[in-house]
Image (cartoon, rainbow, N blue to C red):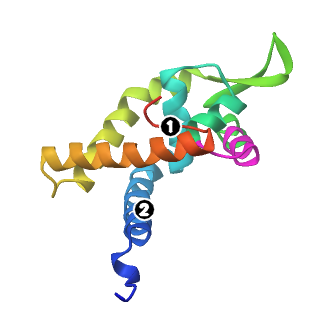
Amino acid sequence: MERYEVEKSLGFLLAKTHQYFSSFFKEKLNKYSLTPPQFAMLAFLWKRDGLSQIQLGNCMNTDRTTISGIVDRLEKDGLVTRRRDPEDRRTYLINLTPRAFALQDEMEEMATQAKYEVTAMLSDGEKEQLERILRKILDAAAATRGCWSPSK
């Protein structure tokens, strides 16, 4: 039987890669006083403004308490507003402010540039292959757990 080597395990490699990506991206976000999850929420809202907190939680695959904290911080920073859904008063809809819309182009460019910097050692084909493989794993996980999928 082959001995287990943690440094060769897929979970370890993915976790360490995530740590590297997150740390690198967090440095880029410092200019905006944002965290990666806060940026992710803004990015989902740039795609579709007015999502509910529940929808944002599904998009980000994040629990309600964490989503609420992210919204609180973005609201305090003047980047989002929270209002009751006129069709369901138990639900809050999250909308971007003009300030958040004004940051969109600059921040999306920064995020794209960060992705290129972190993956500079990979060929275009390798980047595409990596993305396809990661999507395949996440899609399979979503199908078995009935939750968020990157392909949706």
Q: Is residue 151 visible?
A: yes
- Assign the N terminus to one quadrant of the image: bottom left
Residue appearing at x 15%, y 58% in the figure: 121
Amino acid type at mark 2: Ser
Q: Quadrant of residue 144?
A: top right
Q: Which one is nearer the viewer's eye here, 119 or 137?
A: 137
Amino acid type at mark 1: Ser
Counting from the top left corner in percent of width and height, residue 56 is at 63, 33
Magenta-span inclusion, residue 92:
no
Residue range in magenta is 61-71
Residue appearing at x 41%, y 81% in the figure: 6
Local packing at callout 1 (Cα closer than 10 Å; few below 14, some 14-19, many 20+) is some
Residue appearing at x 27%, y 50% in the figure: 130
Q: Is residue 102 above or below residue 141?
A: above
First in sequence: mark 2 or mark 1? Answer: 2
Residue appearing at x 37%, y 27% in the figure: 105
Q: Which residue is identified by label 2?
A: 23
Counting from the top left corner in percent of width and height, residue 41 is at 56, 36
Q: Is residue 40 above or below residue 84?
A: below
Report how far apart the C-alphas of labels 2 and 1 lie in the structure.
Answer: 24 Å
Say the numbered circle drawn on residue 149: 1
Q: Nearer the viewer, mark 2 or mark 1?
A: 1
